[in-house]
Each structure stands twice: as C-alpha cells, then as structure tokens.
Amino acid sequence: LAEGRFTLGVGVGGREEDYTAIDSNWSDRRWAILAKNVKTMKSVWSKDFHKEMGPNTYSKTGPQILAGAVGPKAMSMSADFAEGLAGFSFNADLKEINDSFVRVKEAFIQKKISPRLVTSFWFGLGESGREDIKTHLTRYLGWMGDDLAKNLSEVAGFSGNQNELYNFLDEIKGLGATDTLLVPTSKDISQLSMAEEVVSEFNQKSSN
C-alpha cells in the first residue's frame, strides 16, 4: 500500500504498561532479544525460508528499519539490522543530538553505509509554549513520580518563537540530520499551523 514509503521504528520502551497492553513480557526488554526478533521478521519479509508466509513487500528486503537506540551497545546491535537512528532529544539539545549521531556513525562504520539520522523533540511555540509543554509532560511523565515529572517539564523540549525554531532546525541540519520530527504538546491547532509555517519556509529555503 505504501509503495516503499513506510519506515518501521523499533526500540525497547521504558513503560511497563506498554508491554502489558500488548501482552508482552516486561522482562524481555533487552536489545539482544529485539535484534533476534527483528531478524526473524526480516526473514519472513525476504521469504528466504518461508515462501508462502507473510505479505509481499514492496522491496525484497522489506521496509526500512530505524532503531530507537541510545547506548553504544544497543547502537552496535542495531547496525546489524537497521538503516539508521530513530532518535529523540529529551531536552532539545544540540550537544545531545550530535552525541547520538556520532555514536550511530561509529556503530555503522563496519556496515559501510551512511546511516539515516533522525531526531525528534517536544515543542511549544509562542507565549504559551513552555506552559503547554509543562502541562503535557507533567501528565505524560507522571509515571516517573509527580515531583520528577514537574521538574523535567520545566526544561524538556523546545519552547520559543518561530524564528528560534527555524534557527534550531537549521543547526540540527548542520549536524547531519536527515530528518527532524516535531512532537506537539498541545491540542491547540494553532501550534501545528505555526510549526507548519516554519517547516514550509525551511524546506523552501533548503531546496533553493
């Protein structure tokens, strides 16, 4: 259906309720197990062992896979089955983003390919930007404890005006990012409209 446009992100989550929701074993949240399962899934896509099993994929190797890995060991394992990083910058911090890109590149050296470098972060634009982030994250991170969630909500993500977001995206691109995903923190549709204006201008200038 997607004709090759679909990209699959995989990772080991930190929320036990997510595992419970899909009837999965919380104790299996290890990258070694994930890597084994992904390789099994890819063998079904390729039909190397089971000609009649599973759907036909657009390409023989199946969808592109990005890994939500953080540490060096997880990055190294991911290089065996993934085409790049599905990263997330908790604090929308350039050093944090660059460090993750460096680790990915090091892990992919032996694979002799240039990994796809994706990062993402929470955002809130305009005068209410930081308050929107705080309201959302205080609830979203509540599983960590109320005090910790409150403290983290005061520094996490990006809050600022449209020009500041544009400049931040430009700096991220300068680090070598192939994709940047903006994660909204408000149900106010004007937040998406403002972000869309920034992205549209950014893409237009980048293509010139």
Image: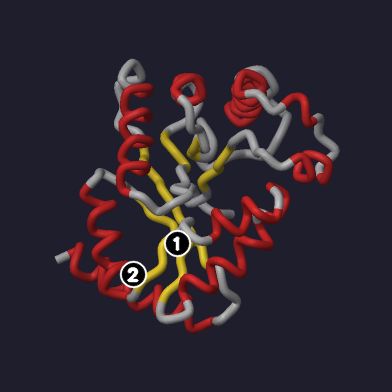
In the rendered image, which residue does mark 2 sit on? 199
Residue visible at 72% across and 29% down? 52
**Mark 1 residue element:** strand
Between the residue at mark 1 and the residue at mark 2, the CA separation in whole angstroms equals 10 Å
Residue visible at 62% across and 39% down? 56
In the rendered image, which residue does mark 1 sit on? 182
Residue type (three-letter) at the residue carrying disc 1: Leu
* Depth check, front residue: 37 or 147: 147
- The percent coordinates of residue 53 (x first, y second) are 73, 30
Q: Is any part of residue 43 visible from this angle?
A: no
Residue visible at 52% across and 67% down? 184
* Depth check, front residue: 129 or 205: 129
On residue 66, the disc is: none
- The percent coordinates of residue 114 (x first, y second) are 30, 32
- The percent coordinates of residue 76 (x first, y second) are 45, 20
Mark 1 vs mark 2: in front: 1
Q: Is residue 44 left or right of residue 67?
A: right
